[in-house]
């Protein structure tokens, strides 16, 4: 049985953040109708506790091809059981969506920035261009050395960690490193990450530590702001920086010494080609409140939008969700909203957050650990990476996505 958090953490279709008719959407497949029905009933109970919005109504329909569909509605929530998949739609205020989406690209909301470029905005388009250039380069690696490469597709590294790097390379046959031909498992030989405002500290910190502990032998960090590529090599149990390459330079990767890589080719972006600049280092005052203090921000917002660069990962059997707000005061208010929702979900009394150090407080309720650090709020949800691996196997099955007829 997968509890509701698996749907909310991993069930965003194609990792797309979208609002359709005022709601955001999750979807989850099953291999058998009776298993889907059992989850529908269990998730209904969890939603009833969490949302505290009255008694749900369930409407049963039969489609033209004889397929059954159950639709639950209450408190603006709609959850539908199709022949196999379950779809959940929940209300999302567009101003909340817009403000938090754009917050990921604002440097002064996030730690770990380049000191001389610690204010202003960065361009998602430039970030995507560098990712595409990496894809082309890793395709060249595959041509000279076989193996498999991909990017932003889930890798189950081991029984405790699953990641979605910007680009990675396996020196293995597909049957050795892939899950049913769609997802990946095991440790890649090379991982490359493109830094952004919301991930600079993570890519150099906790995510890098996950790679180190898993034994990823080669790691690149690409920074579009400084146009540099840093190469790290695992020596024993420690990463050592073995190269830092800048504009106008070439380097020969340790894993592919026969391939010459021009740094400029990796940072060839549409901004440069069209003579435009879509990012800025101009200082702008950080608003005290990204959202009105009268606007309640529920736990569904943290689940849906709390994934910088839309990454849905597991680190040491905990799935992280992270948001930045305009000030510690705003973060404290949102922390309280999230904690209220968590306690209803877990049927627990409201705990008093524990102060760890100035500006940092933590509350643990059941499977949830909620932390506020100054203007940041982070949720870590206990999950089982082995169950996630099985979930990926189900997602590869077409029959599990039987939506029935209209």
Image (cartoon, rainbow, N blue to C red):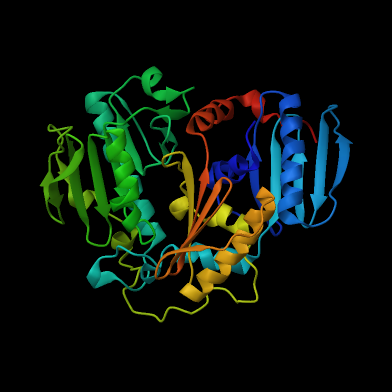
x, y (%) of residue 21? 71, 57
Quadrant of the image containing the C terminus: top right
In-image side of 230 versus 320 (left or right): left
Q: How many marks?
A: 0
Residue that appears at 85% across and 33% down:
63
The quarter of the displayed image where residue 119 is located: bottom left
Residue 312 visible, this angle: no
From this view, report whether residue 280 is shown above or below residue 130.
Answer: below
Could you tell me which residue is drawn at 55 percent across and 64 percent down?
Answer: 335
Residue sitting at x 31%, y 39%: 211
| Relative image position of residue 201 (x, y in whole percent) | 32, 57
Q: Quadrant of the N terminus?
A: top right
Which one is in front, 369 or 375? 369
Question: As drawn, is 401 to the left or to the right of 72?
Answer: left
Q: Position of residue 283 (x, y in %)?
A: 34, 79
Q: Using the image, determine if residue 202 lies above or below residue 31.
A: below
**Looking at the image, which is closer to me, 226 or 53?**
53
Can you give x and y, in whole percent of width and height, for residue 368 in the image? 55, 49
Farthest residue in the bottom direction?
A: 285
Classify residue 128 as left or right of residue 367. Answer: left
Res. 156 visible in picture: yes
């Amino acid at each position: 049985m997968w509890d509701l958090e698996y749907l909310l953490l991993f069930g965003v279709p194609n990792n797309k953040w979208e609002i359709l008719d005022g709601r955001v959407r999750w979807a989850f497949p099953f291999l058998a109708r009776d298993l889907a029905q059992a989850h529908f009933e269990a998730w209904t109970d969890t939603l009833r506790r969490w949302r505290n919005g009255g008694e749900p109504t369930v409407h049963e329909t039969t489609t033209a091809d004889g397929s059954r569909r159950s639709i639950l509605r209450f408190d603006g929530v709609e959850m539908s059981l199709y022949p196999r998949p379950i779809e959940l739609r929940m209300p999302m205020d567009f101003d909340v969506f817009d403000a938090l989406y754009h917050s990921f690209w604002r440097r002064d909301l996030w730690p770990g920035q380049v000191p001389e470029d610690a204010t202003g905005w960065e361009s998602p388009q430039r970030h995507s261009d560098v990712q595409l250039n990496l894809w082309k380069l890793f395709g060249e690696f595959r041509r000279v050395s076989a193996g498999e490469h991909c990017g932003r597709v889930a890798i189950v590294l081991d029984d405790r960690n699953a990641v979605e790097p910007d680009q990675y390379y396996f020196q293995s046959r597909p049957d050795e490193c892939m899950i049913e031909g769609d997802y990946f498992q095991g440790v890649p030989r090379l991982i490359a990450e493109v830094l952004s405002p919301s991930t600079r500290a993570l890519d150099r910190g906790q995510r890098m530590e996950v790679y180190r502990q898993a034994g990823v032998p080669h790691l690149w960090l690409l920074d579009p702001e400084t146009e540099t590529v840093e190469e790290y090599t695992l020596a024993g149990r420690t990463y050592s920086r073995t190269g830092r390459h800048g504009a106008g330079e070439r380097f020969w990767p340790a894993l592919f010494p026969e391939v010459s890589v021009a740094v400029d080719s990796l940072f060839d972006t549409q901004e440069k080609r069209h003579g435009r600049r879509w990012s800025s280092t101009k200082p702008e005052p950080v608003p005290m409140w990204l959202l009105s203090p009268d606007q309640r921000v529920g736990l569904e917002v943290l689940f849906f939008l709390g994934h910088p660069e839309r990454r849905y990962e597991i680190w040491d059997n905990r799935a992280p969700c992270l948001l930045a707000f305009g000030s510690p005061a705003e973060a404290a208010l949102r922390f309280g909203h999230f904690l209220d929702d968590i306690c209803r979900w877990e049927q627990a009394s409201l705990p008093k957050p524990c102060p760890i150090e100035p500006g940092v407080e933590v509350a643990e309720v059941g499977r949830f650990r909620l932390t506020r650090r100054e203007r940041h709020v982070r949720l870590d949800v206990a999950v089982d990476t082995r169950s996630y691996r099985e979930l990926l196997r189900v997602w590869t099955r077409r029959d599990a996505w039987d939506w029935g007829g209209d």
